[in-house]
Amino acid sequence: MIASAEEGVSKPDPRIFEIALGRADCKAEHAVMIGDRIDNDVVPAKKMGMKTVWIRQGGRWVMAVTGTRAAARFHC
């Protein structure tokens, strides 16, 4: 877990994702970003080559995003 307040950089700045990947010793293509905001979580992580999962707040669906389309929807 990376806290932007401690790092001095926040999403959607790609540096926060680079810090997290570096600490985890993980390549972007092997990582999954789980977030509730398309603009701050999903889009920047996807641009870095990460897989993403969008948690839609207030809804009953979790959308797994693998590119520009939803790959699966899971009822919660």
Image (cartoon, grey):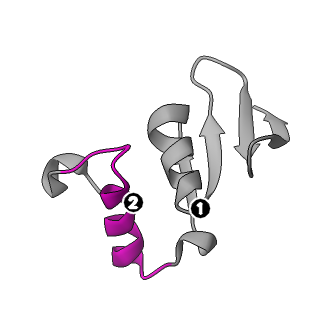
* Circle 1 crowding by C-alpha within 10 Å: few under 14, some 14–19, many from 20: many
* Circle 2 crowding by C-alpha within 10 Å: few under 14, some 14–19, many from 20: many
Quadrant location of the C terminus in the rendered image? top right
Label number found at residue 31: none
Coordinates of residue 9 in the picture (x, y in percent)? 21, 50
In this figure, which residue is indicated by the disc labeled 1? 50
> What is the C-alpha distance between the residues marked 2 and 1?
10 Å
Q: Among all residues in the image, which is located at the extreme right?
A: 72
Q: Among all residues in the image, which is located at the extreme top?
A: 58
Q: Are marks 2 and 1 in contact (CB under 8 Å)?
A: yes
Tell me which residue sits at (31%, 67%) in the image: 19
28 lies above or below 3: below
In this figure, which residue is indicated by the disc labeled 2? 17
Q: Is residue 16 left or right of residue 46?
A: left
Q: How many marks?
A: 2
Q: What is the secondary structure assignment of the residue under circle 2? A: helix
Coordinates of residue 73 in the picture (x, y in percent)? 83, 37
Quadrant location of the N terminus in the rendered image? bottom left
